[in-house]
């Protein structure tokens, strides 16, 4: 298949399996400006599926960089609240949400970390009303990626730009199953396989998970009534969608106060235009009390200091080391892909649908139950072929869950 055919299959997969647009629904897309060809194809398939209106918001890395080079210092505490309020209103009205990633992973690596932190915090505060509707799964939503020149060069620095972009597109298509004869059917089967895994985990009702690997000895308590999710899920509007393409994870809600021990990252994290690598932290009573990083330490420290919830966990996810993305041998410098190559944790906001009846609880009830609240939700990778994970039963009995990064059963 040539690139144009693959791009069209990817766009159709995004609409039919990722978003599952329903007739009469609007769609709000955010995308890098280089994603125009993909957005146009997604727009076509969305209208064919019955969408009444598709609206796209484009972002330009160079315009973002210009702000950090030329804007007044005081301006970094400002965000487009009017825009994010509009997004929240769109979701309240039932619009589906698609985010297309592809930004330069190291765009802001040479900029003032304080300005970057302040801008991220201002944006997070403004985006909070919309984020809460996403984390509570109020509408069907999905995240996919588009190969861009800057991202491709960060992944394949030794290649010419054109070759790097082509190689990244090939990896995106393969990891997303868009290169198969019937990607929609392939995703339906993949979701069924993930559902079998979540059904098993939900049946075990583990009290905690215990991780061991070089530099890692971490125990993560799980909230009572936690729900394992993975693959296709039903949003509160009744639409069954796949929030991430690609996705190899099963995930649930940790208890914000019941995390203890040390953990090291196993892949770089791209956050807010900065690459953070070699993360090492220590948790005590759920809170990060010590942190370090070999690269981007200042950015990581400022990230977890966004608010109190930034130092606590909102998600824990298990991914086998043999996942197709891990097997590719590519470090994508993009969380959508790298988080599906390795088991990971996320600091910040919990997803309320990973707790039984979580979406019906008040903010106070969620906190009392162990859910975390924060302006951020940032996944970072801790899994490897050297990691063992045990499930801790309610009576304290230990069950092997993963050995050397693979499922025991």
Image (tube, rainbow, N blue to C red):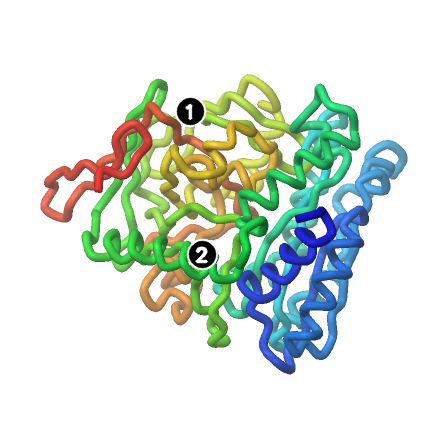
> Where is mark 2, residue-wise?
351
Q: Residue at x 75, y 51 (%)?
A: 79
Residue 133 position, x and y percent, is 55, 65
The disc placed on residue 264 is 1
Image position of 260 (left or right of 19): left
Label whose residue precedes the other's in the sequence (2 or 1): 1
Whole-percent x and y of residue 393? 15, 45
Taking the spot 49% from the left edge, 73% from the top edge, the residue there is 239
Q: Nearer the viewer, residue 152 or 167?
A: 167
Residue at x 73%, y 68% (from the top left corner): 44
Which residue is the extreme one toward the right? 70
Q: Quick check: 384 above or below 174?
A: above
Q: Nearer the viewer, residue 311 or 334?
A: 334
- Which element is circle 1 on? strand
- Please, is residue 355 above or below residue 102 in the view? below
The answer to whether one can see residue 370 in this image is yes
Comparing 267 with 274, the one in front is 267
Where residue 303 sits: x, y (%)? 58, 36
Image side of residue 147 versus residue 277, left or right: right
Residue 58, position as x, y percentages in the image:
79, 54
Mark 1: give few (<14), some (14-19) or many (20+) Cα within 10 Å: many
Residue 218 sits in quarter: top left
The answer to whether one can see residue 116 in this image is no
Q: Residues within 10 Å of mark 2 (few under 14, many from 20)?
A: many
């Amino acid at each position: 298949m040539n690139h144009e055919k693959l791009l069209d299959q990817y766009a159709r997969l995004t609409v039919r399996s990722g978003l599952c647009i329903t007739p009469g629904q609007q769609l709000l897309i955010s995308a890098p400006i280089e994603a125009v060809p993909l957005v146009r194809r997604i727009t076509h398939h969305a209208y064919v599926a019955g969408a009444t209106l598709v609206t796209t918001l484009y972002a330009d890395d160079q315009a973002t960089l210009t702000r950090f080079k030329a804007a007044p210092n005081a301006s970094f505490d400002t965000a487009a609240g009017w825009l994010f309020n509009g997004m929240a209103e769109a979701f309240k009205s039932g619009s589906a949400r698609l985010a297309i990633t592809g930004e330069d992973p190291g765009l802001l690596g040479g900029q003032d970390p304080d300005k970057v932190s302040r801008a991220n915090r201002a944006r997070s505060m403004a985006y909070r009303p919309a984020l809460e509707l996403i984390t509570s799964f109020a509408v069907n939503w999905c995240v996919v990626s588009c190969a861009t020149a800057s991202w491709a060069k960060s992944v394949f620095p030794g290649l010419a730009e054109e070759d790097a972009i082509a190689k990244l597109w090939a990896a995106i298509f393969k990891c997303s199953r868009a290169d198969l004869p019937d990607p929609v059917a392939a995703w339906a089967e993949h979701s069924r396989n993930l559902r079998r895994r979540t059904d098993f985990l939900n049946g075990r009702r583990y009290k905690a998970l215990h991780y061991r690997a070089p530099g890692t000895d971490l125990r993560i308590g799980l909230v009572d009534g936690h729900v394992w999710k993975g693959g296709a899920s039903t949003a509160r509007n009744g639409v069954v969608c796949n929030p991430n393409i690609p996705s190899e994870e099963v995930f649930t809600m940790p208890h914000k106060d019941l995390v203890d021990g040390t953990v090291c990252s196993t892949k770089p994290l791209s956050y807010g235009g900065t690459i953070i690598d070699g993360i090492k932290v220590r948790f005590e009573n759920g809170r990060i009390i010590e942190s370090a990083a070999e690269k981007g330490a200042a950015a990581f420290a400022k990230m977890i200091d966004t608010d109190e919830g930034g130092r606590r966990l909102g998600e824990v996810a298990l991914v086998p080391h043999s996942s197709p993305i891990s097997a590719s041998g590519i470090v994508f410098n993009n969380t959508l892909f790298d988080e599906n190559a390795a088991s990971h944790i996320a600091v910040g906001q919990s997803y309320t649908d990973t707790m039984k009846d979580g979406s019906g609880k008040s903010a106070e009830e969620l906190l009392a139950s162990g859910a975390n609240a924060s302006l951020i939700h940032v996944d970072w990778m801790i899994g490897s072929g050297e990691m063992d994970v045990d499930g801790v039963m309610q009576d304290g009995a230990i069950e092997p869950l993963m050995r050397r990064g693979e499922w025991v059963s």
